[in-house]
Amino acid sequence: MQHQQQQLQQNLNDQNDNGNQIALKITNLLNHHPNWHHLLTSSDTIPVAALTPQVVRSILLQDHVSDPERLLEFFYWVQSQIALPQSIDSFSILVARLCNSDLLGPTNGLLERMITTHLHPPASDASTISDSIASSYQSCNGSNPAVFNVLIDTCREVRRLREAVEIFLGLKNRGITVSLRCFNSMLSDLLKVNGMDLFWKVYGCMSEVGITPDVYTYTSLVGAHCKSGNVGEAKWLFVEMTEKGCRPNAVTYNVLIAGLCRAGSLHEAFQLKRKMRENGLMADSFTYATLGNGLCKERRSREAKLLVAEMWEMGLKPNYVAYTALIDGLMKEGDVDEAFRVRDDMFVHGIQVNVTGYNTLICGVCKVGKMEKAHQLLNEIVGMGWKPNAMTYGSVIEGYLKEKDTDNAFEMFDEMKRNVLPTVVTYSLLINGLCHCGDLHRVNSLLEEMVASGLKPNVVIYTALITGYCREGRVEDACKVLKRMLERGVVPDVFCYNSFIAGLCKAGKMEDASMYLVEMKERGPIPNAFTYGAFIRGHGKAG
């Protein structure tokens, strides 16, 4: 037994010696022969099969290849020749070597390959990579701390934000910090994807290590508070940064103006725009579009139109977003003619109306029953080479149903199916419209078609069907629908229960209504004034 162990150890030693000899030969080739690819491919003494991950690691550990770019070229060449993945240590050693030579671009590319090769949660986590790179960083002379910035940037670029934060926190525990630019990039990316928990965790660590925020940090912080609906805190930060000598830029102003508009504080938003100019910063297209959108939401579209005119006077060209918001606002206020004048103004200025803009126009004309105009706009979309989408067809279908014109609604639905797949919203519009028209027989066949197409009816559809049956006095059928939706895992909401309970009360079935009120409370929806109003009317009718 002891002899076998000694023999096994001797074999391992021989393999290591052989691997070291191969590593020395390859190092010599890389240092002295520009055509090393050809020599390695045609060599009898160094077969390609001998270029194991262990041999590659040995070459990197020896650190005798003078040209790091050639070493990287060799590393990639080996990966193309053998299927075995290189070890995480090999990646880390080479990453540190490249970064120490200020080859940050190649370092980024290598790190990206390292992440895709070795980062596969839950089998491995980001700390495995960061620990390995930190070890290589600490063992190399003259190490460049930029390697950690590049590592986090690479994670961000390949959309591994959570891993980027995990790496950052692991580095902090090792006493390693990253640059302010890297902090700001993480905060900005986390804000974009609404990763607010991680956002505040990163900012908290930034404060702990004593890094002073700059204008980009403050802009992200203002944006985070605005996104959370805490505009008061955002305003306080805006004042604080100015007091600390950090001058807000145009983006900072725009972020706070957008937050104020979302909060309905338009007066303050316009005050901030004036302050922006006083401080030598010009409002840009984003500023105007944000303010215009805020005015439209408050049904002040005429004022929004004046803003568009002001933009032209200032030498700014309003884009389709600003115009579409204005058209939408005018349509919602019922000012259809003015909305089309704005559309014409877009054409005059060479701004093309896209499908989204046309959808806004179509939705507006359908709401006021101008179905011929809706068809005209639909033909314009097709004539311009675009394809109407589900929203386009849905608006026209809804318009016909409001006019109780079910034949044309289904004709449009058939046209839609030839060009684009109907959505749950499409079926919901049709089913709700048919229920209002009392065409319940057609609803059942439409439901079957919907399920056959792979779509699942939602609570809105079931509520429309229950309401339709109750309106016709068919409460038993409504009860069957309620049971069916529960069997299919669709949870009734307060509107659904209210519709059913109101139908029962109207039919004089007060005991059944009381039973479903109990069930409603048990399942979570909270009864409201409409619920109890149905009982009052039911008992009053019963005397």
Image (cartoon, helix red, strand yellow):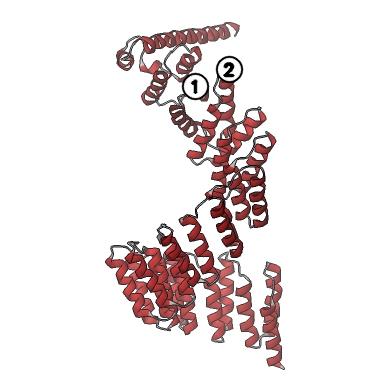
* Above or below, 428 relative to 230: below
Q: Quadrant of residue 531?
A: bottom right
* Above or below, 284 relative to 205: below
Residue 436 visible (yes or no):
yes
> Which residue does the image show at 56% across and 35% down from the upper left?
123
Label 1, secondary structure: give it.
Answer: helix
**Dot 1 corresponds to which residue?**
90
Judged left or right of residue 502, residue 16 is: left
Say whether disc 1 or disc 2 marks the residue closer to the N-terminus. Answer: 1
Dot 1 and dot 2 residues touching (CB under 8 Å): no
Q: Tell me the amino acid under the disc marked 2.
A: Ser
Q: In this rendering, which labeled residue sits more in front, label 1 or label 2?
A: 2
Rendered-image quadrant of the C terminus: bottom right
**Residue 2: % across, % down:** 60, 7
**Dot 2 corresponds to which residue?**
139
Q: Tell me the amino acid under the disc marked 1.
A: Ser
Q: CA–CA distance between discs 1 and 2?
A: 14 Å
**Residue 419: % across, % down:** 33, 65
The tag on residue 342 is none
Label 2, secondary structure: give it.
Answer: helix
* Above or below, 419 relative to 398: above
* Above or below, 361 relative to 281: below
Q: Nearer the viewer, residue 165 or 281?
A: 281
Q: Nearer the viewer, residue 284 or 92?
A: 284
Within-10-Å neighbours for mark 2: few <14, some 14–19, many 20+: few
Within-10-Å neighbours for mark 1: few <14, some 14–19, many 20+: many
**Residue 484: % across, % down:** 56, 71
Q: Quadrant of residue 361?
A: bottom left
Judged left or right of residue 120, residue 206 is: right
